[in-house]
Amino acid sequence: MITFIVRRLIATVFLLIIVSAVTFAIFFWLPKLGGQTTYGLATQYVGRNPTREAVLQVEQQLGLNQPLYLQYWHYLSAIVVGEHYNAGTATAYCPPPCFGYSFKNQQPVWPMMVSDIPVTLSLAIGAAVLWLISGISIGVLSALKRGSIFDRFSMGVALAGVSLPIFFTGLIALELFSYRWPIFPNVTYVPITENPYLWARNLVLPWICLAFLYAALYARLTRAGMLETMSEDYIRTARAKGLPERTVIVKHGLRAALTPIITIFGMDLGLLLGGAILTEVTFSLHGLGLFTIEAIDNQDFPEIMGVVMLASFFIIIANLFVDILYAYVDPRVRH
Amino acid sequence: MTGGDSPAQGPRASGRIARLRARDRGDRRSPEPEAQATVVADQSEPSAMLDIRDLRIHFPTDDGLVKAVDGVSFTLDRGRTLGIVGESGSGKSVTSLGILGLYNRGNSQMSGKIYLDGEDLVAADQARVRELRGLKMAMIFQDPLSSMHPYYTVGNQIAEAYLIHNKVSRKAAHAHAVDLLKRVGIPQAASRVDDYPHQFSGGMRQRAMIAMALSCDPELLIADEPTTALDVTVQAQILDLVSDLQQEYGSAVIIITHDLGVVAELADDILVMYAGRMAEYGSSDDVFLHPGHPYTWGLLGSMPRLDRTRMDRLLSIRGTPPSLINVPAGCPFHPRCDYAARNNGRSENEVPALRPVSPGHLVACHLSTDEQRRIWAERDKVAS
């Protein structure tokens, strides 16, 4: 088990390096392939309507005219040791981990992202708890009462949940529960360290809307998984032993049906941690999703690159956890 | 394959069979409702450990009623072995799963009587049958890999059955599991007990399955094709193990198989099933040496034998087993039977009654006993 984890960790480090290289290539190499000159690239890093001298100066300072591998090396070393950037007249220091410097905001990217992480984290984890509990229990009940009214009703709702976009359910929820009946007024992020009650109350609507979408998916997945496992031979064996039906369902059926769901859950959570863009925009929560949207709107390359790296990091780490958890759950993976 | 020579076993308990014969004199197997009236007459107290009377298990489906088991009766005492033989879809597995009560009563219809120690399992409520499952009756399944849960250790799965039926600590149950693994011949049982099923070889897994079935010392052990998924070399070991354990535990054993070689070695009695019905039932000697049903002849003819040298190819039974929704009228075997034409259309129109051809040997065929003997003698001579 320990060698398994160590092996996975080493693989994860390599994966992160590859992701950084690919991200770097997308932002610095692809434009060149597309005919973009280093001068053109440099215009992306200066303010609006720059003078030619200013652009050339930036090109020089950022080393955009250097060979790519050198630029990549600088990019990586900045993450470890930090970097000095010339911003306007003053020199700005970007302390490690330096994921670039936003010339448009006159700030290093990393601290800006870090301040947005708690919002996304609160949103994603709260919603995940909700959708896991509701999705799995509805899925199990539907599978056990296959063809019943409950099954048909919940699968119908699930279909609606999968089909309805968050900016629709979110706006409806806001209209009903924030304005017409202000049960959850004023959906703004309050740090949990500041006021746990307000933190939770203000996030209830986004949680429910986001969880609805995923719960629908997970209910369908759990139902399909349960239907499959409950017809396995080992379920018949468990019954033949004389186990009570509940033990058969939970210990033998659900345990096996949940394994594939762990994989999908890891992916989904990792993806969400990189920014629940639609939810954050709908509820105006300033997390990584909104950060991304603003970065794209401003064509702020260092910010976009930074958030891509961070999101990939979350997905890779989530997958690492899934792999380890999977090995823990399924002994066949371990040996 | 496992040896096909005739079994050299002593005379059977004739008293039990005589009783059976007396019970089976009436035509209880005919599916026509008016014929079922004779079933009512069969109200004697069960005396054998397992006494099955006119068991029917039907499944209503969108395409029609599947009569998977249609009037099966037999008895079995402690320490004895019954072999149920037939092709796929003859209802042999359904019979065994039905005895264990593993069919959802919501989508199946079960009638008849299953007396286990005098207690009727068909009439008993589900909770009671569940209590008895694993405790008094246990089953060994065909494919030990898919029949064991991949996520739990072998020991855990063996101990589980023991824990459910006995008030013992987890530790005691674990020790019991090690004991059982030793009993079924797993080397280093104390350490292998914590292995997962996929770490066991096929034969070891089947041994572990047997240990699981034996965990509560059941009176009835049903083995559903216990050797089908195993290597030929391992098959014999597993059969030996079953027979040794039967001696040790004194359980009654039902072996379900399509391999006549298996029952030849182990069974005291043999029940041949076809299309959910009984075709022939008798002692192992009777069925192997004086088979009366053309289907049994077919099964025996398709089996390689060591004591027959001149047969250059095995005979197959033509055609395929019927769908259990549309069982042929009359004798269900008649479309595949070479001798159906000799019965003046009775085979096509009339369900043959199960009747004794010799004491304790029942055959459901329209051919007269003399004809059966003559035809078998000819076939036997040609073969040897």
Image (spheres, helix red, strand yellow):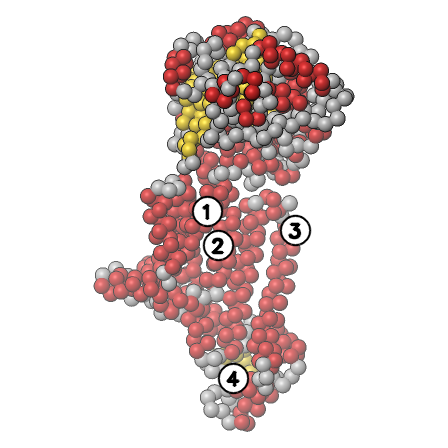
Q: Is residue A74 visible?
A: no
The spot of residue A51 in percent (x, y) is: 51, 94
The mark found on residue A224 in the picture is: 1
Instruction: Inspect the image, locate mark 4, and give the three-letter code of the amino acid beneath it.
Output: Gln
Q: Residue at x 45, y 25 (%)?
A: B57
Q: Nearer the viewer, residue A210 or B124?
A: B124
Identify the residue under disc 2.
A265
The spot of residue B193 in percent (x, y) is: 62, 33
Question: Which of the two labelled residues, at mark 3 and mark 4, occupies the earlier sequence position?
Answer: 3
Crowding near the residue tagged with mark 4, few <14, some 14–19, many ≥20 C-alpha atoms within 10 Å: some
Above or below, comparing residue A26 to residue A245 in the picture: below
Identify the residue under disc 4.
A44
Instruction: Inspect the image, locate mark 3, and give the three-letter code of the amino acid beneath it.
Output: Thr
Same chain, labels 2 and 3: yes
Crowding near the residue tagged with mark 3, few <14, some 14–19, many ≥20 C-alpha atoms within 10 Å: few
What is the chain identity of the residue bearing mark 4? A
Q: Residue at x 48, y 39 (%)?
A: A230
Q: Nearer the viewer, residue B273 or B131?
A: B273
What is the chain identity of the residue bearing mark 1? A
**Of labels 2 and 1, the one closer to you:** 1
Instruction: Classify mark 1: helix, strand or loop.
Output: helix
